[in-house]
Image: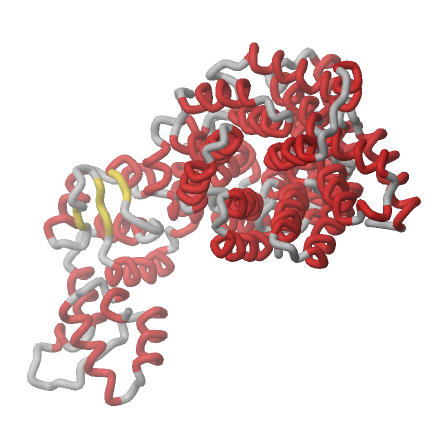
């Protein structure tokens, strides 16, 4: 660790080693992290300039021209290697000055043409000289302007282009300097610069999946902005956009925290009088309720109605596809299956490469819950052939993987589904909050193939993934699936406990499928205590309606056949249409006979 910190410099390593008679290793590591220039050798038989790094660097510094000294000091503000363009922007000088630094190896060239760096020891010494020369403020200001200019790409929340930028890889390579530029701009209260760069800077952090850095850097901005009552409209806009991105960190905060950031974002964007960003966050709020369960479906319905009204008032079409897709998810929640199918067909017809990739994720989920395998296959193919960048591919790939496993299972290819899902679980692009459900479905498929030993292990992993998982939608369906697994294994008590938990969560979220699916198996468990007609009605609904979770349909269909239950076509249509109100009434009928289940 010490050798790396000293950049492998032979003299520095020798001087550090000479301190071991006085310092322990841990102390020496801390010392070299603060300042290595005071290191001295206790030897008298070496030239004075080789007895300390300070003497060595002082000697080299004294031989530089005044212009070279100023440039070297200013180059110390970089956090990593830098391009020729960046060097000239932050520490402007003539080529002869840079060549002077190169000749004496104080400025180093990287293996890749056009890239430069300072040795860590030189940078530390130069940073001290920067303080003495009083050039730091101007150099850091130029550094911030240069690196944040890369994010000055315009746009609106959920309608930006940072993830499509041709220099995306370049941004990743220089992000340490971008982070430092952001921090320095906040320290200088350069709100105009942060306003121009903030939207796409936050978008970059989101698309590169850096939640810890995103939380730290965006919170730093919001806490240093003027108080809400003292902000300008542009400062409200900046705060509102950053708050919305903070809310997207669903893996790192509770539902209550997400809701809090969304509510603040809406308030600040309203104060900024920026309707397009306001519409985007209203729609996002509804989407997060529907996709992550941070609130009841009735709240999402109110938000979507508000988004639609705002879009009509301001004639905005940019987010129309997202809003339509979210309405489809709402219809699935409410068990309005005909409307959900119509909405899905319309969304599918309007899909294009320019559509936000979040639409693909939403409609693939809808197709799965509707058990519409033909549409799901078409959507997977369309998503696979999207001409999107790496960041967008990483976003949509987990839904493609999930859908492929579902298709294989519904085709009866359970062994193939198990293999595909096992591979998807370990894919680099996996999304953490989806893993609980992915394991839950895999445990069910393993059980149905007879591999109960593996299924038990997988089911335990699935439940483990629900702990700390803030996406209550995935938690509820995972509990239901693992509960069914325990029922199939003969562990009725554990099955009932998990099914009751899933049912309770389904009621809180107002989700038809999350209420009915566990209810179906609770009815099976307590069938002896219930009227035969009620048990038969539940069995029929489970076999034909999307109210039953799609992965459980085959079991329900098999049970219907075993019980020799039949119905006329008109009865089938009525049962297929079972919605939230019907499921809630069914639950009341069951609870009247056997007591509260939630």
Vertical comparison of 471 with 2: above or below = above
- Image quarter for residue 26? bottom left
- Depth check: give the residue in front, 257 or 113: 257
Q: Position of residue 437 (x, y in %)?
A: 57, 44
Q: Nearer the viewer, residue 219 or 146?
A: 219
Q: Is residue 572 above or below residue 333?
A: above
Camera-side residue: 371 or 187? 371
Residue 50: % across, % down: 13, 74
Point 20% across, 79% down: residue: 17
Q: Would residue 466 appear left or right of 196 to someone viewing this image? A: right
**Residue drawn where x is 69% and y is 26% of the image:** 544
Quarter-wise, where is residue 128 in the image?
A: bottom left
Question: Which quarter of the rendered picture does the N terminus lie within?
Answer: bottom left
Label total for image: 0
Taking 30 as reference, is 266 left or right? right
- Lateral position of residue 76 relative to residue 416, left or right: left
Q: Position of residue 286 (x, y in %)?
A: 70, 31
Task: Look at 29% across and 39% down and name the residue there.
Answer: 92
């Amino acid at each position: 660790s010490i050798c790396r910190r000293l950049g492998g410099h032979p003299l520095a390593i020798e001087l550090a080693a000479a301190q071991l008679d006085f310092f322990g290793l841990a102390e020496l590591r801390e010392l070299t992290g603060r300042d290595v220039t005071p290191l001295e050798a206790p030897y008298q038989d070496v030239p004075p300039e080789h007895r300390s790094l300070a003497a060595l660097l002082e000697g080299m510094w004294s031989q530089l021209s005044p212009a070279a000294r100023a440039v070297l000091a200013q180059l110390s503000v970089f956090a990593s290697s830098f391009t020729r363009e960046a060097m000239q922007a932050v520490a402007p000088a003539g080529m002869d000055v840079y060549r002077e630094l190169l000749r004496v190896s104080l400025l180093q060239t990287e293996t890749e043409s056009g890239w430069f760096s300072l040795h860590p020891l030189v940078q530390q010494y130069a940073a001290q000289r920067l303080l003495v020369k009083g050039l730091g403020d101007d150099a850091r200001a130029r550094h911030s302007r240069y690196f944040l200019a890369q994010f000055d790409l315009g746009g609106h929340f959920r309608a930006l282009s940072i993830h499509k930028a041709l220099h995306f890889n370049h941004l990743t390579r220089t992000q340490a300097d971008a982070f430092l530029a952001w921090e320095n701009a906040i320290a200088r209260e350069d709100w105009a610069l942060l306003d121009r760069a903030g939207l796409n800077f936050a978008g970059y952090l989101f698309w590169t999946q850096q939640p810890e850095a995103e939380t730290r850097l965006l919170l730093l901005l919001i806490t240093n902005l003027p108080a809400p009552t003292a902000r300008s409209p542009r400062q409200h806009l900046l705060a509102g956009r950053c708050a919305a991105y903070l809310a997207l960190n669903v893996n790192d905060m509770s539902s209550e925290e997400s809701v809090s950031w969304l509510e603040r974002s809406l308030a600040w964007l309203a104060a900024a009088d920026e309707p397009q960003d306001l519409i985007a966050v209203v729609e996002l709020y509804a989407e997060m309720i529907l996709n992550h369960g941070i609130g009841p479906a009735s709240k999402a319905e109110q938000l979507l109605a508000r988004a639609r009204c705002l879009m009509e008032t301001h004639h905005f079409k940019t987010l129309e596809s997202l809003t339509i897709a979210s309405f489809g998810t709402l219809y699935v929640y409410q068990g309005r299956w005909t409307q959900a199918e119509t909405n899905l067909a319309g969304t599918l017809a309007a899909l294009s490469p320019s559509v936000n990739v979040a639409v693909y994720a939403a409609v693939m989920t809808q197709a799965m819950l509707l058990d519409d395998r033909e549409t799901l296959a078409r959507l997977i193919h369309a998503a696979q052939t999207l001409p999107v960048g790496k960041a967008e591919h990483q976003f949509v790939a987990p839904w493609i993987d999930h859908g492929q496993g579902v298709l294989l299972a519904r085709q009866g290819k359970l062994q193939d589904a198990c293999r595909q899902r096992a591979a998807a679980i370990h894919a680099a692009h996996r999304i953490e909050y989806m893993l609980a459900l992915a394991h839950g479905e895999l445990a069910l498929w393993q059980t149905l193939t007879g591999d109960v030993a593996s299924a038990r292990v997988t089911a335990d992993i699935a439940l483990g993934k629900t702990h700390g998982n803030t996406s209550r939608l995935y938690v509820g369906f995972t509990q239901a699936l693992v509960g069914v697994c325990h029922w199939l294994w003969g562990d009725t008590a554990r099955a009932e406990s998990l099914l009751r938990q899933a049912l309770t969560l389904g009621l809180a979220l107002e989700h038809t499928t999350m209420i009915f699916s566990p209810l179906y198996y609770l009815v099976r468990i307590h069938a002896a205590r219930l009227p035969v007609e009620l048990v038969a009605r539940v069995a029929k609904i489970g076999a034909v309606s999307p109210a039953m979770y799609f992965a459980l349909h085959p079991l329900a269909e098999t049970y219907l056949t075993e019980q020799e239950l039949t119905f006329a076509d008109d009865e089938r249509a009525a049962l297929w249409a079972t919605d939230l109100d019907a499921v809630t009434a069914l639950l009341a009928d069951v609870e009247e006979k056997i007591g509260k289940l939630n």
